[in-house]
Amino acid sequence: MACMTTPAARNSHTVHAELVAGVMSVEVAVGDRVAPTDPVCLLESMKMEIPVLAEVAGVVAEVVVNVGDVVHDGDPLVILSVS
C-alpha cells in the first residue's frame, strides 16, 4: 500500500524536541510569522536553557506544547504552515 500524504501535510513543517526537557516558555502564537533561526520556545534540561529555533520560514499553525510540559526527543513542539 502506498503512503499517502495530504496537501496540508506537504505544506507544513513540524519543529520537534531534540532531547528530554521541560518547556520554560513558548515564544510564538498561532498566526505569528517566523523566519529560519527565530526562537519558537525555550526548553530547560539539566539546569541549562536551550532555545528551539524555527528551521524554515512560515506561519505558526499550531502550538502543541504548554509551559511546564515535559517533552521527549522527537515530540512535536510547533507546527508551521509553509508555502
Image (cartoon, rainbow, N blue to C red):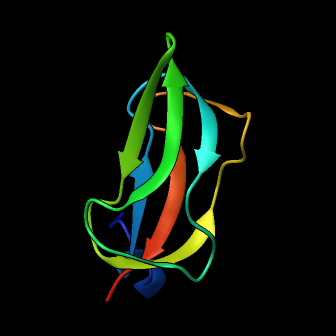
Rendered view: 38 above or below 33: above
Along the line of sight, the residue nearer the viewer: 28 or 3:
28
> Would residue 65 appear left or right of 73 to someone viewing this image?
right
On screen, 5 above or below 66? below
Residue 5 in view? no
Q: Can you say which quadrant of the picture contains the C terminus?
A: bottom left
Which quarter of the figure has residue 74? top left
- Residue at 42% over, 25% down: 19
- Residue 12, horizontal then vertical, whole percent: 41, 74
Query: Where residue 29 appears, x then y in whole percent?
Result: 63, 70
Residue 59 coordinates in the image, percent (x, y):
46, 81
Residue at 41% x, 54% y: name it.
15
Of residues 22 and 25, the one nearer the viewer is: 25
Task: Identify the residue at image location x=56%, y=65%.
Answer: 28
Q: Position of residue 26 (x, y in %)?
A: 60, 52
Question: The N terminus lies in which quarter of the figure?
Answer: bottom left
Vertical placement of 47 versus 37: above or below?
above
State how many labels appear: 0
Asked if residue 69 lies left or right of residue 22, the reply is right
User: Which residue lies most toward the top here?
Assistant: 46
Say left or right for 77 vs 10: right
Residue 30 seen in render: yes
Front-lying residue, 63 or 39: 39
